[in-house]
Amino acid sequence: MNHTIRLLPWILILGNGIFIVIQLPTLPDIIPTHFNGAGEIDGWGSKYTIIIPFIIQLAMTLLLSYLAKHPEKHNYPFAITDENRDYQYARSSELIMKLNLIINIIFATISYSIVKAELPLIIIVSELILLFAAIVGHLIVSGKKR
């Protein structure tokens, strides 16, 4: 599973990049660039602005992939000792990999929403629940071995 969860964000980036390249010629000159909390469009820009979220997605994936491989560089809510180091490093790397995947899903949704010019509220809520569930789950599991 570890290998799969490391690979999935890169598959999503590749898929999102292909989607953008295919959609770019068919996009109108002005596209949505921002949605408010209700999923309504409240910002517009050039069709080439669809590339900006993709660049951010790629940069975040590179950063999170690096951090997943270097848990000693993370901050922890409690002291790391010789007894809990391996456990905490493994849990922290696992969280970063999960967050990387969830963030890539969010960015793929953003690209799709820009092309379709709509962002359903249920998608926003579902992705936020998924993101916070991963973080809360991590805190519960990590807190067991301080």
Image (cartoon, rainbow, N blue to C red):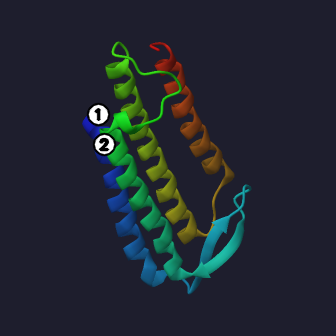
Q: For the view shown, which residue lies furthest in the bottom direction? A: 29
- In the rendered image, which quarter contains the N terminus? top left
Q: Position of residue 4 (x, y in %)?
A: 28, 39
Q: Position of residue 5 (x, y in %)?
A: 33, 39
Q: Amino acid at mark 2?
A: Arg
What residue is disc 2 on? Answer: 6
CB of mark 2 within 8 Å of CB of mark 1?
A: yes
Q: Which mark is residue 80?
A: none
Decide if residue 42 is on the left or right side of residue 109: right
Q: Nearer the viewer, residue 4 or 142?
A: 142
- Quadrant of the image occupied by residue 39: bottom right
Decide if residue 112 is on the left or right side of residue 96: right
Q: Which element type, helix, strand or loop, lies under badge 1?
A: helix
Q: Residue at x 44, y 66 (%)?
A: 54
How crowded is the residue under tag 1: few (<14 C-alpha within 10 Å), some, or many (20+)? few
Q: Nearer the viewer, residue 59 or 112?
A: 59
How crowded is the residue under tag 2: few (<14 C-alpha within 10 Å), some, or many (20+)? some
What residue is disc 1 on? Answer: 2
Reply above or below: 104 against 47: above
Q: Residue at x 49, y 80 (%)?
A: 48
Q: Nearer the viewer, residue 124 or 136?
A: 136
Q: Amino acid at mark 1?
A: Asn
